[in-house]
């Protein structure tokens, strides 16, 4: 099990690296996170929701993601309320103050069921567990679902990860160990220092001090990696402030208050000629080459935020002048003409609103979710060679065109186009190399830039290479032997 001294310590990527390293040793790692809180989701082949981070770990382990790997998913809805997903399907919603009272027992049952399903599907596999936040939040320890309770239940060998970039790494580790109960401390079999800048030898004295004062081996010191890995949560997006040399296209991405599925932007982030700028409501949109409106967990609330901040008005003015806009899922709903919520599913009572009116679309919110993986040949942007779009739908709300509108794909329910404004329900639309490059080439042609080759592989190939480089660094800097010995 990979535990962390805090949220954002690097548990997700260290778990992915561990999965790939074990796979290389001939084992079958089984990634598992009992409970996750995230609006960055994935839909498995059975139509079940799970956190994207466990999907990433599944790919690192050479497996198809399945919702049993993340049996409890909490999706924040605002106002201290979250949607509760059990084994891939919505089980209701709950306020934070009532969660452990009402959902602890059902959550623990879902976790045990997920474990049974995963181990039955892969007999002989080795579970690789990821914890959540810190394992020693003393106010939560008696009701902990996914850290030490699970580690004790499975008698897991635990690695404790600390982020040295944040400072105070000795206090992080020693303080965490000091707050463990006597029955829990023997579970910690190794310490791991993450995101170290400089030569490893500079930390040799720190390693010796930690081992002498804790009695636990330091398994390794992971360096600060220059690779741009997928963010672990939406907070990490704000740290993506680097500037790319030679970026020829500037693309604004609206950081909506209820942002979801921001991993849709990873393929664009990986394009060396593209610089993404995350724009918060209240900030100036500027004059980018294109604007992407990403997914939203609460479309109507985000629509209100765009309007009240003036960013919605800026976006409308940008589009009226011919600016290129692409909305994804909830982002597409915001671009429509009408958002109807007759049952108050999005905001209490009848909270219907007029949309930004950049696409002639009407969305009606209903209780049922669209959850499916899908693929369809693209019809837009027009080109001689077709591109296959692959991804998944994950949304409430049925959308229809109020007037004739160009379809984005052969499946007419996946998206619509009007002039330079387009929208799609397909999460993962940028994963298709040919389609992504075709969309970028439209923008490049507007600026008189030479066109890029559209003969590009699916982004999953780049993701695999990234995971391999992560595992290479992990194997070089971390000694797993103490963890694998009986």
Image (spheres, grey):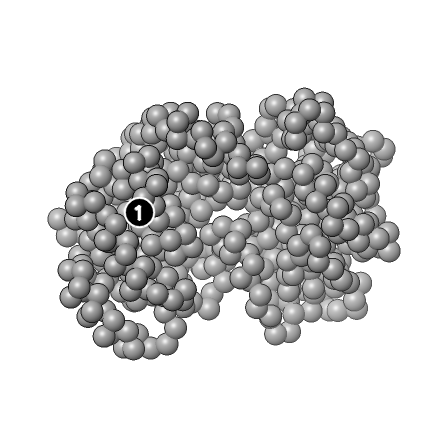
* Residue found 37% across the figure and 62% down from its top: 163
> From the viewer's perspective, is 22 left or right of 389?
left
**In the rendering, at what x and y percent does residue 147 appear?**
31, 42
Residue at figure coordinates x 18%, y 60% from the top left: 214
Instruction: Give neighbour class at mark 1: few <14, some 14-19, many 20+ (Cα, 10 Å).
Output: many
The residue drawn where x is 29% and y is 64% is 170
Q: Which residue is mark 1?
A: 136
Residue at disc 1, secondary structure: loop
The answer to whether residue 422 shows anywhere in this view is no
Image coordinates for residue 91, horizontal then vertical, percent: 48, 25
Q: Which residue is located at x 38 percent, y 66 percent?
A: 167
Quarter assignment of residue 216: bottom left
Q: 303 or 157: which is nearer to us? A: 303
Whether residue 326 sits left or right of residue 193 in the image: it is right
Residue 340 lies, with reference to residue 335, above or below; the image says above
Residue at the farthest left position: 486
Which quadrant holds residue 369?
A: top right
Residue 230 makes an appearance in the image: yes
> Along the line of sight, which residue is nearer the eye, 258 or 200?
258
Is residue 236 rendered to the left or right of residue 66?
Answer: right
**Front-lying residue, 218 or 14:** 218
Is residue 356 rendered to the left or right of residue 173?
A: right
| Total numbered labels placed on residues in the image | 1
Residue 345: percent from left, percent from top: 64, 26
Horizontal and vertical percent position of residue 273: 64, 67
In this picture, is 466 found above or below 260? below
């Amino acid at each position: 099990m990979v535990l962390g001294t805090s949220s954002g310590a690097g548990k997700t990527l260290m778990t992915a690296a561990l999965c790939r390293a074990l796979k290389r040793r001939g084992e079958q790692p089984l990634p598992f996170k009992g409970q996750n809180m995230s609006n960055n989701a994935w839909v498995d082949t059975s139509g079940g929701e799970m956190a994207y981070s466990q999907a990433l770990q599944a790919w690192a382990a050479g497996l198809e993601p399945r919702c049993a790997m993340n049996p409890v998913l909490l999706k924040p809805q605002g106002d201290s309320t979250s949607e509760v997903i059990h084994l891939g399907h919505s089980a209701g919603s709950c306020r934070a103050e009532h969660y452990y009272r009402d959902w602890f027992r059902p959550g623990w049952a879902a976790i045990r069921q997920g474990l049974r399903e995963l181990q039955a599907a892969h007999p002989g596999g080795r579970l690789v567990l990821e914890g959540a936040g810190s394992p020693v939040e003393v106010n939560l320890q008696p009701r902990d679902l996914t850290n030490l309770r699970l580690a004790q239940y499975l008698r897991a060998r635990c690695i404790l990860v600390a982020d040295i970039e944040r400072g105070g790494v000795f206090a992080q580790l020693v303080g965490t160990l000091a707050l463990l109960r006597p029955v829990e401390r023997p579970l910690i079999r190794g310490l791991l220092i993450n995101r170290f800048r400089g030569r490893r030898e500079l930390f040799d004295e720190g390693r010796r001090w930690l081992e002498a004062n804790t009695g636990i081996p330091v398994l390794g010191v992971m360096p600060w990696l220059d690779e741009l890995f997928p963010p672990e949560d939406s907070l990490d997006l704000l740290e993506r402030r680097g500037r790319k040399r030679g970026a020829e296209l500037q693309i604004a991405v609206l950081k909506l208050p209820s942002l979801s599925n921001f991993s849709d932007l990873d393929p664009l982030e990986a394009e060396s000629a593209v610089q993404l700028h995350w724009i918060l409501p209240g900030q100036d949109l500027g004059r980018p080459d294109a604007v992407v409106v990403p997914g939203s967990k609460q479309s109507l609330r985000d629509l209100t935020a765009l309007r009240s901040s003036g960013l919605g008005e800026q976006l409308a003015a940008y589009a009226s002048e011919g600016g290129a806009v692409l909305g994804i899922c909830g982002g597409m709903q915001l671009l429509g003409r009408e958002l109807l919520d007759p049952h108050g599913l999005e905001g209490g009572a009848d909270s219907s609103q007029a949309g930004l009116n950049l696409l002639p679309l009407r969305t009606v919110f209903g209780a049922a979710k669209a959850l499916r993986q899908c693929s369809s040949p693209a019809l837009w942007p027009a080109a001689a060679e077709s591109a296959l779009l692959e991804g998944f739908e994950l949304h409430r709300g049925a959308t229809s065109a109020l007037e004739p509108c160009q379809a984005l794909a052969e499946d007419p329910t996946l998206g619509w186009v009007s002039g330079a404004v387009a929208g799609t329900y397909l999460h993962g639309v940028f994963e298709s190399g040919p389609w992504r490059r075709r969309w970028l080439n439209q923008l490049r042609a507007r600026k008189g830039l030479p066109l890029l080759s559209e003969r590009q592989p699916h982004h999953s190939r780049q993701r695999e290479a990234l995971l391999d480089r992560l595992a290479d660094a992990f194997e070089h800097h971390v000694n797993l032997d103490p963890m694998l010995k009986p």
